[in-house]
Amino acid sequence: MKAIAARRHHRLAPVVLLLLALLVTGALYAVLAPSAQSAPAPTEDDVVAGEALFQANCATCHGPNAEGREGAPSLIGVGAAAVDFQVSTGRMPMQMNGPQAAAKPPQFEEEEIAQLAAYVASLGPGPAIPSDEQVDPALGDAANGMALFRTNCAMCHGAIGKGGALSEGKYAPDLSGSTPTEIYEAMLTGPQSMPVFNDANLTPEEKRDIIAYLDVQQAGSPGGTDLGSVGPVAEGLWVWVVGIGLLISLSVWIGAKSS
Amino acid sequence: MSADKPTTDLTTSSTSTSSVEHHGDHVPERFENPGLPPHVHRMGDTDPAAAKRSERQVVALFTLSIIGTIGFVVAYFAVPPGETVASMRLSNLLLGIGLFLAMFGIGVAAVHWAKTLMSDHERVEARHPQKSDPETRAGAIAALSEGAADSGIQRRSLLKGAVVSAVALAPLTIAVPLVGEVGGDWNVSKFRHTLWERGRRLTRDPSGTPIKPAEVTRGSVYHVIPDGLREADHWIEEKAKAVVLMVRIDPDQLTEADDRKDWSYEGIVAYSKICTHVGCPVALYEQQTHHLLCPCHQSTFDMADGAKVVFGPASRPLPQLPITVDDEGYLIAQDDFNEPIGPSYWERLK
Amino acid sequence: MSTRATTAERAAGGTADYLDQRTGIGLAVKNFARKIFPDHWSFLLGEIALYSFVVLLISGVFLTMFFVPSMGLIEYEGPLASMDGVEMSEAFASTLHLSFEVTGGLLMRQIHHWAALLFMASIVTHMMRVFFTGAFRKPREINWLVGFVLMILGLGAGFTGYSLPDDVLSGNGLRITDGVVKSIPIIGSYMSYFIFGGEFPGEHIIPRLFTMHILLIPGLILALIGLHLFLVVVHKHTHFPGPGRTDRNVVGFPLFPVYVAKAGGFFFVVFGILALMGGTMTINPVWNYGPYDPSPVSAGAQPDWYMLFLEGSLRLMPGPGWEWVIGGYTLPMNVLIPAVVIPGLLFTMLALYPFVEAFATGDKREHHVLDRPRNAPVRTASGVAILTAFFILILAGSNDLIATHFDLSINDITRIFRVLVIALPILAFWVTKRICLGLQRKDRDLVLHGHESGRIVRLAHGEYLEVHTPLDEYERWTLVQHEPRRPLELEPAEDERGVRRKGYRRDAIRARVSRFFYEDRVEPVTPAELAAAHSHGEHDALEGGAGGQEQIEASQAHDTQPAAGGAVAGRSARGHDARDR
């Protein structure tokens, strides 16, 4: 922070400030826009509507009482957070059986998702959907978030959350398109292969720090295009394609006779 | 090349086959090298306007380089990296493009100059065999034998032995202290022991806070370091050996060896996080299958079944850390690992 | 030069005189200034390597001004939010400092790393060129070995530099190195201590790697580059086959001015491309990986591309059952085979290939005209097979990225690659050899029958023929210049008096190797065959007509327009001069 204070009067400070303001605005927008869905507390009507939706869309696999079937887990006690994560990212309802349910455009309206969540939450106590404040990256500490991410998340999701492979065709998805709420819910509920990070393992503040770290990544790389941020393999590919490719083309030009 | 056989008297086929067999009475066995093809002139060689055009292009390219250098210097002063990622990227981009133009301009200009304006007549230079001619060789041998005779090395065998021994032994003055000191204390038995001991608490990595069994809910995974790690001597080496991964597994899904029944606590198992293959931290825990995958070489271990290898290049299960709880209800180790953690080495079982 | 010398010319003359009186440099200038170098794009591949090395030296010197090779821990304060206030080694902190707070530092760092990747990539392509054109043959076997050692040193330079920032990614790379070193029988544990000065990671490894990286390895590379280039000058550069080019001459352009401009210019081109890459493409973003800590690891844990084959080799090896315990001592074959044995075999094959081929040909002559790869089918196929093996290993080292980018199972990919790494090189050998032989047949066909002109003529008796234009002698020469290489004949085991000959076994092995190399072959067209093709062909009726010259003209008259036929005959007559001796 000292470094920032020292440069407060720099002639480019206004430009930097403007950029920062733009970034913060963008970040705030990203945080606030999707979180509108979780605002009102669920009512009894929501639970009833949710049950109807559940019977029509989910009961075939998860059972009429959400007790679970072969290959589909019981939803009693998974909480509203799990439903909100699975349905709002389009993972549920599942389109087809595969190594894992993939994210796709959500199949339900926000209101319907809230109703489904209310119904499932009513079946047994489970993690609730986080509040806006819990997932606000501006309140988190990105440096602490990075340390936690590195120990708990990077082995699957990659150093800055660009995703990675698991066994037998499963994978840890790219997090750059995920909203802070989704990231929080995923940590809390441990969807599919992902382990659960309960509040004793990563406190709510620590989860927010991780969200802040991932949010910082939206600014991109200081070095230019990030080449997918998947590590040295991509760099190796590009040195052959761009480096050797361009230089061999130029060598051919140098070696060719002029007309 | 078989020499001066005229190529003109090509005969009819009936004789040509036999002529090959007779080593070319009429037809040479091989084609003759026709020599350099006639030189093809470039546009610029005959058309002064084209040459002038090339010259202007070369000048333009050098000018581009000058613009690049100026741009680089301007960017250096006007666009410092600043405090944000965007400003760092801009600084790097402008400097990079300036340097690119500065260098690439010179390079392309020089090559274009060489290609279009310098003579493009191919020249021929003779090669000579690498080996020296017989006189030179004889001279070299004579010089060596004369020198050897002067030194008297062949006659004085004691001297020969002395010089060889002295020169061979002298490097020891460098090698002995180097080898002696470079490996630290050379005490490789340290591989066997970690910081874990009876009663040492399992704590979260990196915060170092202790863990209660109730906090390890089903499906969650804890990255664990021993309590008091940072106070240890050589804590980073100790951390490299002591890191542990801890999960809770449904008792009905957990398979335990008979001699390890009391190594887990209420279905909570703790295994070394250091791969038995070549030592990467194995950390990709898939909670549905209880498989633990190494991102380096994809060794896969089954956490529900003694961390046995189910896939990949590792050949041994991960060492298990026996755990229990202390009086305050925090998870503690019962003992150190019962085998060296990490990759295999020669004297591992000794 | 005009008699009225300008001031500049007088100054230059004065300097030259000063130098010559003290160094006798005039002789060197006289000998070298107009030395001939042949021109071909593929001869520039080695120059890319040389120039990336120069760029590495320049950018590396810049980096050493700011880098602190220390593993002492400090708390970093800097502009990047995710790094501010984090405890890290001085090496990592100084890397962040020179990247973010030194203007132009990030550019230099990225240029340095891109140049390192390019250095290795150009060494490999240069080696491929030398291999496939047979440029390693006598007298250049020693220079092949020098180049081979340079490649190994390049790997060492890359590896030591990659680890210097002390980040999580390279730290785990060092840990893998430690694991591989420990697997070596008897001395493994001690070698690990030797490298790390005690247990991994210790606090010595970064300073040690730094000394290797900035002093020892570049010093050796520089010395060997000197030797490499010295030998190039001594041998004079090879040239591709073509009219007027022989083993006794070198055809090309003079060093001064053409090569000074082209090669000198190419340095700036290489530097420019590297600057463009450094300015626009992120490389090794250590600030994403974080300072080294033995606990974390990130997905996509791979080394730089030139070490990827080792990573792939380690990934492919099945583990269970391969850890052998002999007399209580552990022999981890699951590490030794992929990390020591397989790379050892591949590299040994590469280093010794020139000697194997020389053994098979029994050829003791000097070769300065390159081979067209098709004219050495077994060599080309062997090279492709080795490259295929390396390529599969590189893909295996990237199997997690293949899995995520192509929606495949990493386990399936690994199982498939385990088969392919053995099967595909063999298949590649066979296919490449067939392709080479096919191309040679195509060359023969072209020489014998000429180019298809697309013009169809109808003969008097109603037959349709496509007119073929014969090759001119310059084009033809390139296709027929190579010597037919035949397997060595094995002399009988006993001489006329029935006494067993000395060295028969060696000769028997040699004959077998030679047969492997040259049994399947397509020999170049001989003048007799060409004459036969012209006289035979579809026009047997004309056979036995007048003498050779008329014979050709007569048959040509049917095949093509008479002018072309005459031209061929005329040039054949000129061949009498035998200019190329």
Image: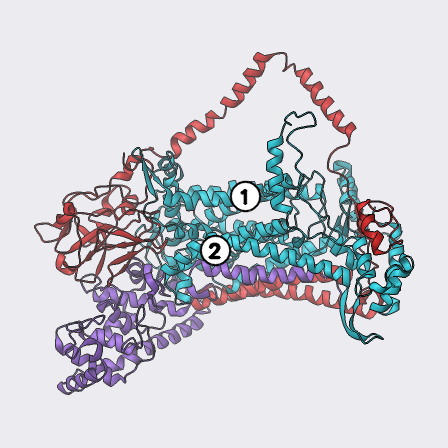
Q: Secondary structure at mark 1?
A: helix
Three-letter code, disc 1? Met
Q: How many marks?
A: 2
Three-letter code, disc 2? Ile
Q: Is residue C145 left or right of residue C567?
A: left
Chain coloured red: which letter?
A: B
Residue shown at 71% from the left, 42% from the top:
C235
* Coloration of the structure image: by chain
Residue shown at 78% from the left, 72% from the top:
C465
Which residue is label 1 attached to? C349
Query: Outermost residue, left direction?
Result: B327
Residues behind callouts 1 and 2 on a single chain? yes
Nearer to the camera, C370 or B46 = C370
Colour chain C is painted in: cyan
Give the crowd class for mark 2: few <14, some 14-19, many >=20 residues within 10 Å.
many
Which residue is label 2 attached to? C392
Reply above or below: A143 against B264.
Answer: below
Nearer to the camera, B345 or A82 = B345
Residue shown at 50% from the left, 60% from the top:
A237
Q: Secondary structure at mark 2?
A: helix
Q: Position of residue C394 (x, y in %)?
A: 47, 55
Q: Where on the picture, by quarter, is residue B188?
A: top left
Q: Is residue C153 visible?
A: no
Q: Position of residue A10 (x, y in %)?
A: 44, 67
Q: Is residue C537 left or right of residue B219?
A: right
Q: Is residue B6 left or right of residue B195?
A: right
For marks 1 and 2 on the same chain, the one whose residue lies earlier in the sequence: 1
Q: Where on the picture, by quarter, is residue C144?
A: top right
Q: Position of residue C261 (x, y in %)?
A: 72, 56
Colour chain A is painted in: purple
